[in-house]
Amino acid sequence: MSKFYVEGGIFKDLADPAPQPGTEEKYGPFDTEAEADKVWRARMSDKIDICNHRLQVFAREA
């Protein structure tokens, strides 16, 4: 059964695969993708003015 996580942060640029140190964000595990999506939407709206802020929803096997 998959668990869902929200991960990301503030990135230096789009080519850099890792967030800048100290800006990392991790939330979860969530039982459903809908729960993870709700957290994703809330966290993205908190930092809407930061163009290099990215979060993604990931599914991982539990």
Image (cartoon, rainbow, N blue to C red):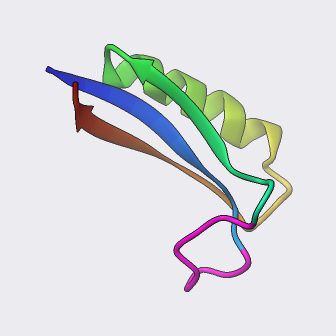
Q: Which residues are magenta?
A: 12-20
Rendered position, 29 above or below 60:
above
Q: Quadrant of residue 46?
A: top right
Q: Is residue 53 magenta?
A: no
Give the residue at x 13% y 20%. Answer: 1
Residue situated furthest bottom in the rendering: 15
By secondary structure, the bulk of the magenta-drawn segment is best described as loop
* 37 to the left or right of 10: left
At x 32% / y 17%, what residue is drawn?
Answer: 32
Towards the viewer: 41 or 16: 16
Residue positioned 74% across, 38% down in the render: 45
Marks counted in the figure total 0
| Residue under the image location 76 percent in, 66 percent down | 51
Q: Is residue 19 covered in magenta?
A: yes
- Front residue (pair 26, 57): 26
- How far from the left and from the top, in percent, is residue 10? 73, 61
The answer to whether residue 23 is above or below residue 46 is: below
The image quadrant that residue 53 belongs to is bottom right
Q: Quadrant of residue 33?
A: top left
Quarter of the figure with the C terminus = top left
Horizontal side of residue 12 vs 2, given as left or right: right
